Image (cartoon, rainbow, N blue to C red):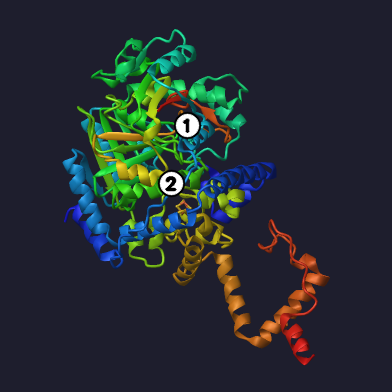
Amino acid sequence: MNKQLTLDHADAALEFNKNEAKVDWHDETLWFVRTKRDRAVAQIPEWEQLREAASQIKNYGLSNMHDLLIQFEENAIRNGIKIHWAADGDEHNAIILDIIKQAGANRMVKSKSMLTEECHLNQFLTDKRIEVIDSDLGERIVQMRGEPPSHIVLPAIHLTKAEVGETFHEHLGTDKGATDPQYLTEAARQHLRETFLTRKVALTGVNFAIAETGGFVVCTNEGNADMGVHLADVHIAAMGFEKIIPRAEHLSVFLRLLARSATGQPITTFSSHFHRPRPGQEMHIVIVDNGRSRQLGRPDFRNSLKCIRCAACLNTCPVYRRSGGFSYHSAVAGPIGSILAPNLDMKQNADLPFASTLCGSCSNVCPVKIDIHDQLYKWRQVLMKEGYGPGSKTVAMKAMATVLESPRLYRMAGKVGRGVLRFAPITVENGLNPWYTQREMPEPPAESFHDWYVNHKKA
Amino acid sequence: MTTRDQMLANIKANQPALRPVPTDFTFTSVYPDLTKQFIDVLTFVGGAALIVEDFAAIRASLQTQFPNMTSVATTCPELADLADVTMNVTDPHELSGLNLAIIEGPLAVAENAAIWVDERQIPQRVAPMITQYLVIIIHQSTIVPNMHDAYKLLKVDATGFGTFICGPSKTADIEQSLVIGAHGARSLMVYILP
Ligand code: SF4
């Protein structure tokens, strides 16, 4: 198992930060994607209104979820699609295994789905001797390496082309030392084409499910979802129930926002709308809860269910860019993952809402206007109250509370602090002070605000 | 209670009070020249476009672009004689050797160069992805400014499958270097008729 995945965020980030050159490279690569997003957004004068529209459509969706899901189910069944409901990851996995067995298959090709990552489907199927091949190039790369994706849109963003070349040499027999992306992609193309042509069962995620028509949309650049399902006898689509949108026309809003926010493209290469199985094909949709209805019931956090998984908040996050996706030890990394993960397991993911500077950049870029940094802040309150706060923070917070409660203590602490920083910086700038790691301590001001105020009032 | 009923009951119990469905969610885009906008974006995403007078011009261009190409299929009646294989197969696997597919696109979008196709243009859904090279023919008059305009005209469930295609298949999964031709077509050529 990847060592970083077993550590808490801060320690895993420390691990990642050991290779400073790689961290800089990771930071710059993600920032490059963020700037592409900015350029694309600048082309759309009504961008802010579009975000507002998307947010409102999603608000309506959350508020009418029950009826929309029933409407979706009715229409989908009428379209000849089989609908399954799964309360959690285990049920989701069992349903999929059952469909594969019914089809008499022992192999499946899969296109990208963060939901199946969340449910650990690959491991489950592998244990049941079903072979699963991920067909998105980035996913295939990390799958060969035995790693999970480190980013929800760019699963292999943490790897250099030399590392990919090494992996392909080992698994696909490409030339040793080859790093040319064109050459490496061609090798993957040949390998995956063979896979598409020989699999009877294919699984995709769902980007949007349309209540009005009982169909769903899958967006990819590579066309891997399409290659898989149009050649397979059985198409399984796995969706979290929050993917529902009321009407087909609303797709115009989301498809304008999604790819621009994700990679700065005007739209993905393929935006495929599935409504009926092709003649002779079976089509299944597995609608999954896995904690989502609980999140729907938390007024402070339900907005996180509006997420369309564009990853703009990851790309812009100064913490994500410098700590890497694995440091979040959760299927969805970055700011939005840090909101979703504590809902799944508060204890195990209590560190994540603290993995943010609360700078607000995530909320600024979010195409559906999720109040991401506010929710991270609110999670911190909940976690501290429930007793899941990180240990070091609990002690420090208690000390701070005592100081803040007493004006006299507060002034004294300020004086001492300024003195220490000025005359004995070593007592602060050491490894025992977590604030000093990766940071330079500020130059202390000569007088406190209190003294400054008193002096100026006199004048 | 079944999982379904339990899930729906939980959702009903936890969902917030009903909000209105927004009515104001479509916008107008103004481009001085829709065709130019379409071509510019298509070029930006790695595709190519050519404005042509008629099918004779398309034919001539195809012959220079894809000289001596075999395994060509088309659903355009005007170009039927160029095809040496058919897309009308019962098993999509039979298309695995397809080199060039020439199809028509009934609707195109200027803001993002996406072209809609559904089962009326592609009797086998996999055709535009499995082919090595893809050609789509559109009419200038069917280019609409933006996605809102497109969805107003579309009936997405008129057939069982439809897709917006924007440029050739591509990936940037290896160090963000753009590579054209991931799993689907290695190129997209669009001919624009009046
Ligand atoms: S929270 Fe917003 S910005 Fe982040 S992935 Fe979801 S939609 Fe994109």
Res. A292 image quadrant:
bottom left
Q: Which residue is mark 1?
A: A137
Compared across the picture, whether B1 is left or right of B45 comes to left
Q: Which mark is first along the chain, 1 or 2?
A: 1
Res A80 → quadrant: top left
* Total number of numbered discs in the rendering: 2
Measuring from the top left, give residue A208's x and y in whole percent: 34, 46
> In which chain is the residue bearing label 1?
A
Left/right placement of residue A395 relative to residue A144 reads: right
| Residue bearing mark 2 | A256
* Quadrant placement of the C terminus of chain A: bottom right
Can residue A331 be seen here? The reply is no
| Chain letter for the residue marked with disc 2 in the picture | A
Picture coordinates of residue A265, whole percent (x, y): 50, 40
Depth check: B177 or A3 in front?
B177
The amino acid pointed to by label 2 is Arg
- Cβ of disc 2 within 8 Å of ligand 1? no
Label 1 is placed on what type of residue?
Leu
Residue A261 appearing in the image = yes
Circle nearer the viewer, 2 or 1: 2
Q: Circle 2 sits in a helix, a strand or a loop, which is it?
A: helix
Residue, x 40% and y 15% (percent of image)?
B56
